[in-house]
Amino acid sequence: MTLVIDFPLRATVVDMPTDPLPLDRGRPEASRIADSATDAVVGNAFADGDEWALEEAYRRWGALIHTVARRATGNSHDADDVAQAVFVSAWRGRHRYSPDRAALPAWLLGITKRRIADHWDARSREQRRIEAAGHASEAMPQTEESVEQVADRVLIADELSRLDQPQRQIMELAFFDDLTHPQIAERLALPLGTVKSHIRRSLIRLRSRLEVDGVAV
Amino acid sequence: MSQSEMHAPDDLLAMQAMGEALPDAMGRHVSSCPQCQAELDQWTSLVASGRSSSPDDVPGDPSERVWEAIADELGIGVVTKETEAETPAQVVNISSARRRWSTSWLVAASVAGIVGGALLTAGGTALNSSEPSAPVAAPPVIASTSLAALPQHQGAGAATIVETDEGDELVVDVSDLSTGDGFYEVWLIDPETFQMVGLGALVDDSGRFPIPDGLDLSQYSVVDVSLEPLDGDPVHSTDSVVRGELSA
Ligand SMILES: [Zn+2]
């Protein structure tokens, strides 16, 4: 097929701008969509209704949402339902997402908080029916407030898992194992000052993650 | 010296939250300074969250099954081995250029019946009219690329070619582009011949541009966003900000 290109807009023959194209001609198979797009680009595209951004958002934050839901509801099956409900309602309500006001994961976590609240509402209705039938009740362990705490814990744990060594091991010993700084230094045979400066830098990094991705109100 | 000049540095407050004592003078300031107290409270709650977290809080990989349930509920295409296997029987009557760009997305979508009609019939009659309450599925993606900043510039983005009833469109989403005098313009460039087509100005973080009929996307495969001075010259300024090559 010979294509005679008729340029309805305007076309010009010019030299390519100075730098060589970042071409990757040898790509063996269809590349994943927008693998290297920044979170902000994914957020803009999501708000704009571009379908690839939904899949990309799920790929980036699906496990985060699922883990928050699993830790809040206490079981993986309920977490599946919550995670599905979060992404479905986020996509249907994407016109309400404003990338200028919150990062996409923060907005998704805000929806997660509401879907978990729905989950507990359904549970307590069920509970009341059981109590009305004369059975003993179990305590309702979660409140809406604590979903934010769960989200903070999961975001922190997620960020810890992304730290390089030895920061990662140091922070895991400090947070998961509650070791003191001298204990960590001894365990890893590192100078105490080195341990403290790794902890200091890691904490700064954790806080910026929470500021960006923490639950949006 | 005024109090504001002696606020405790952030990282010292962080370490205090971790149980490291502040130097005496600093400790006295913090205990009487509401601003430092508020800062310290934040660190204390971060550390409390951290100490109450456990390895079980680390997210694993997103579940494929949940994704399929989401895609299914929203009626959008999911790429699976089975749908790919059905390719030859499903995609017909499309130009060779189109076939070259047909993707597993497109295939999966047509298998699912979402775009089958639009693809296979002239005029692109709307489907799904029997399901008025169903969410409108986003148009299928034919090709896409991420956009990376060129040296001397910053910014990032993504570009996708989507099929709509009115024809193909290039959807461009960018963020944090280098600023400068003038405006951003979106181009499709043929990397072999260096011919290029200006599609229009990008005035926002996101824009949609119809692809001129007959333009071969396998040839004009490079998406380029340039910074154009307001000089009335329609030629590419050669000042490209972000760029990427489309692939199916
Ligand atoms: Zn102060």
Image (cartoon, helix red, strand yellow):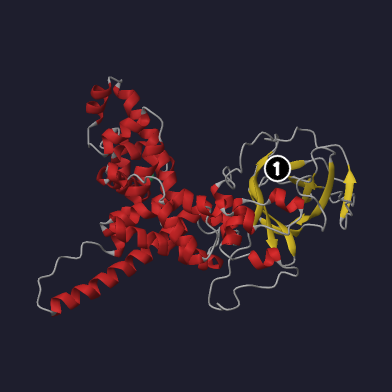
* Residue tagged 1: B245
Q: Identify the residue at image location x=70%, y=50%.
A: B101
State the image coordinates of residue B5 (x, y, percent, origin top left): 44, 41
Judging depth in this view, the residue of B19 and B49 nearest the camera is: B49
**Which quadrant of the view contains residue A49?**
bottom right
**Which quadrant of the view contains residue B26?**
top left
Name the image quarter holding the C terminus of chain A: bottom left
Taking the view exactly as shown, the residue that stands out farthest to the front is B89
State the image coordinates of residue B208 (x, y, percent, origin top left): 71, 59
**Which quadrant of the view contains residue A119?**
bottom left
Residue type highlighted by circle 1: Glu
Query: In the image, B177: left or right of A18?
Result: left
Which image quarter has ligand 1?
Answer: top left
Query: In the image, B96: left or right of A177?
Result: right
Judging depth in this view, the residue of B149 and A49 nearest the camera is: A49
The correct choice, above or below, for B196 with respect to A28 in the image is: below
> Chain for mark 1?
B
